[in-house]
Amino acid sequence: MTEREARERSGLLSVLRYDVTVDLRDLDAPRSTTKVVFDGKRAGATFAEARDAGRDLRVPVAVAVGTQAREYTRSLTYDIGGSGLCRVVDEADGSVYVYAASGPTAAPHWFTCFDQPDLKAETSVRVESPPGWVVAGTGMGEAAAAVVPTYATGFVAGPFATETVREDGLGVVLHAVRSRAPVLEGVAPGLARVVAEVVAEIGERLGCPAPRKGGELRIAFVPGLAWPAMETAGCVMVRDSLLVAPGSSGYARLVSVLAHEIAHLWFGNLVTIGWWDDLWLQEALADVVGRTALRATPAGRPYAGAEARRVHSPVTLDRHRPALTAADALASAASHHYSAGVRQVQDWMRALGEKEWWARLARVVSEGPLLDAGALAPPERRSTAGADRWEELQRAVAACEIDGPTALGVLLSLLGHERDADRLAGMTTWFAERLRRAGWTRPAGGREAERLVAEALREVVARAPDGSRLAATATYAWVSTAAAPPVRSLLGGLDGGRSAGPLAWAARNRLAALGELGRRGIVAAGDETGAEVATCLAFLPDAGEKERAWERLFAPGLSDPATLAGMAAGLWHADHPEHVTGLVARFRHETAARTDPCSEPRAVALARFAFPRSVLTADAFTSVGELLGEGRLRPASRAAVRECAAELAWGVRFRSQWMNLDAV
Ligand SMILES: [Zn+2]
């Protein structure tokens, strides 16, 4: 499942409730029945997920508008990896235990559901078990069903030993396999004390008591769990090998793991990430909040320094790649989880000051139900994070790692938050010169992409301070991407359409590119021999005009690099490749002769601006290769052409990789 699919599904429906019944009366034939109630926002088709013996199944779901319910009954298989539905035998006494631990993407293994973190629902699990078994899990008992993401659901069932300790009004209920009852008994009083203090401490700091109704927190030590621990709603699960007596060497780690899981009751269960690539943030918050609570409590303090996690990798803030599958997003998020994410969060905390930091955390918790990363980072750090993502986006596109629509999604989210005028200009140029010119949206949709970019830019203009450089930059970028009617009305507002200022010419260039302004109108607006008119004519979607523009690049009068760059932008406009194919041969045969007599800087500029950069075909690439092979160009021009050829090679590769198109 990809993020894009998840977005589509959450746009279609919201889930109100899951009632899951797991039938374990015949342990060799477990079954589950899921009743899901959801609200259709509009009519459409989607799917629910189920996993059977390692196979992912998509169950088609037709969605109508309004509240509706579905019921799914299926037989289940046990998983041996410690996630999903598991059956384990305690070798000490032969007792059998069953548990379901969802964790990211494992919920469909034991109940049919819409498995994505933002579709949270009231969930209650009921287990029909062999007589005498202890059962604990999500939404069980007297507590009301919890509103949780599917990945935080689960249960444990078996002949567990139980210790209940009441501390400060909180009932801490601990379960462990029967054979380990003596250890559990020894550990219970001290552990319950720490747990109760940590729960109270975090609740107080966030102004929101533990998300446990009924004043009870259950913790089960489970054999063979896939993770050291999992914050399953209704029953936190901890791998049973972590259960050790107080005073033994692993006890500090046990305490520290529990503090982390308790913090997940807020950051994970109460507020939840929207998609898996933010998992690092949730994990880092659980670590920092859990550790802070330990340090602040008498019972926890001795263990606050335990277990530094060792993962060293740079953190980038939520790298959104909507086409990535959940598994890939998790894999890329995994490297960010612990130490690196913790450092990032601590950095934010230092920048904001501890008081403001906790105030923001409290706000995030009270606002829920999704975790808003942007609300936690200080503004200047957010823009650093934006810079990281911008660099990462360029790198990923240059390496052909992501497709055009994905890149566009990232770009739009970056544009929406950008406050740096230069970076904004860089982004919009990159969009026009690279992404758009690579034809990545062909055969349809280029205009649609442009419309989205224009919309994002209009919003930047709206929120930028009047007269600021950001407002000016965004306005120019908007003019070069907007549709004809608003551009025409902007132009009309500039001295009745007669302005000769740069914004008016930017508007005319745009109208020319769209075929909405002809040669006569352009020439009438300015000096026929001037740079503005020459540039604007280059934007016309017409082969003859393109030829003339190409010739004008070499004309003596218009030589400053800004003018040449402007003319080249028009000449090689992303929408006009079919009007410039004839220029490939001219570039191949004439460039060397034409650049020969001029100064070296001008020769380099000409080689670069005359290069047929929008003709992304294998033939163009071959033709340029032949020119390079002949040795007629001066070394500096050769280097420029070689650089442009690398760009062209990228464009051809990007296009064939993501669009199965060899040529335009
Ligand atoms: Zn965690």
Image (cartoon, grey):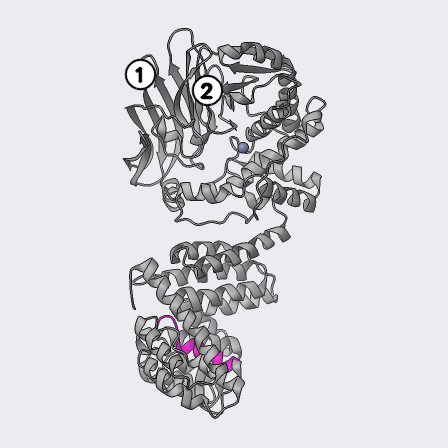
Q: Can residue 524 be seen in this view?
A: no
Residue 561 in sight: yes
Mark drawn on residue 28 = 1
Magenta segment's dominant SS is helix
What amino acid does circle 2 point to?
Gly
Residue 452, given in percent of the width and then of the height, sits at 42, 59
When the figure is inspected, residue 10 is found, relative to residue 24, above or below; the finding is below
Report the front residue among 416 and 299.
299
Q: What amino acid is found at the position of numbered circle 1 in the picture?
A: Asp
Residue 195 placed where, x, y %?
62, 21
Quadrant placement of the C terminus: bottom left
| Label 1 residue SS | loop
Q: Of the residues tagged 2 and 1, which is closer to the observer?
A: 1
Q: How far across and how far down the image is residue 183, in percent?
A: 58, 13
Residue bearing mark 2 = 137
Q: In which quarter of the image is residue 165?
A: top right
Marks 2 and 1 sit apart, C-alpha to C-alpha, by 21 Å
Side (left or right) of 611 relative to 272: left
Q: Give the range drawn in magenta.
A: 562-575
Q: Is mark 2 on a helix, strand or loop?
A: strand
